[in-house]
Image (tube, rainbow, N blue to C red):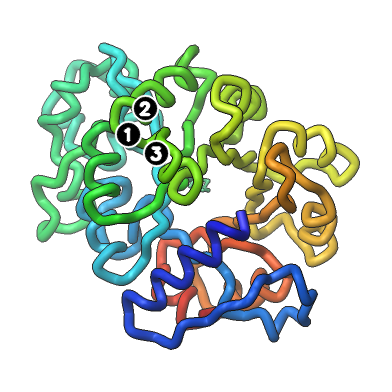
Amino acid sequence: MYVCSAAATSAALLAIGATLLTGPVAQAAPAAGDRRGDTLVIAHRGASAYAPENTLAAVDLAARMGFDWVENDVQRAKDGELVVLHDDGLARTTDVEQRYPDRAPWKVKDFTAAEIATLDAGSWFGSAWAGARVPTLTEYLRRVDRNDQRLLLEIKRPELYPGIEADTLRVLREQGWLDRAHVKRKLVIQSFGADTVRTVHRLRPDVVTGFLGTPAVADLPAYAAFTDQINPSHTTITAGYVAAVHRLKGPHGKRLAVSTWTVNDAAGAVRVDDFGVDGIITDRPDVVRDAVG
Ligand code: G3P
Ligand code: CA
């Protein structure tokens, strides 16, 4: 949402000692080039071009680089614990195949959190990261809070984990993330599952939500009933589409926002910034910040 975007961008700029840029994106309706600098930069899976994705190291690196918004992916282990991982399997980003050779296909849902906690989630990315772990959502929230960062939390593959919406909200509540300060400024919950976003909105109407995808323009009003953000792939959008989203108000009475993914190069960042997006989700937040900040 724009209020969050401006605050977050300002905080990041202050953190790196840059000039503070202010001014609402929408009020004066400036040309796209004039509003450059207001766009929120969100570190995708942490600073995942430079540290192993979805680890605490990736979150810490994003913080050191001056980025307070991070994105992650949440799934559920066999014993019900929520863990932070992108794939529904553990093989790509951990040493699970070596550690548990008899347990193919190594799905997250088939391993307990205790088992997952023993895996090396860093060596695949580089030997310097050996020993990084798959964090539980609890561990992750504590670290993001300690870093005074903000979280774009994705509920990943909800069709595999019935009830994960309530589970996620429970962990967020237990960790203090559903208090007024967090809900107002620090948290967005998004998913590719429209039913999941709708469920989160029903369970906690105060929480800011995002739908991952590019609904047809004609369908956008229906989405605006339960989501505050439409977050599409950058390959699917035009300036006209972003404007169509912006014409609508979400469930909290504010203009629907657009954060697009995953933009990792300067030219791509400038392109979507000129479309008028509110946020850019990127593995290379430094590159995007240099391009549009
Ligand atoms: O936050 C948007 C983006 O993360 C969605 O795609 O596959 O990277 O989770 P994916
Ligand atoms: Ca994601």
Q: Amino acid at mark 3?
A: His
Gap in angstroms between the C-alphas marked 2 and 3: 22 Å
Question: Is 17 placed left or right of 98 in the picture?
Answer: right
The residue nearer to you, when weighing 192 against 35, is 35
Q: Position of residue 282 (x, y in %)?
A: 47, 62
Q: Position of residue 157 (x, y in %)?
A: 50, 27
Q: Secondary structure at mark 1?
A: loop
Label 2 with label 1: CB-CB less than 8 Å:
yes
Labels 2 and 3: the sequence-earlier one: 3
The vertical placement of 217 against 117, above or below, is below
Q: Residue at x 66, y 50 (%)?
A: 232
- Residue placed under numbered mark 1 in the picture: 176
- Residue placed under numbered mark 3 in the picture: 86
- Residue placed under numbered mark 2 in the picture: 173
Q: Position of residue 214 (x, y in %)?
A: 73, 45
Labels 3 and 1: the sequence-earlier one: 3
Number of residues whose C-alpha sits closer than 10 Å to that of mark 2, classed few (under 14), some (14–19) or many (20 or more): few
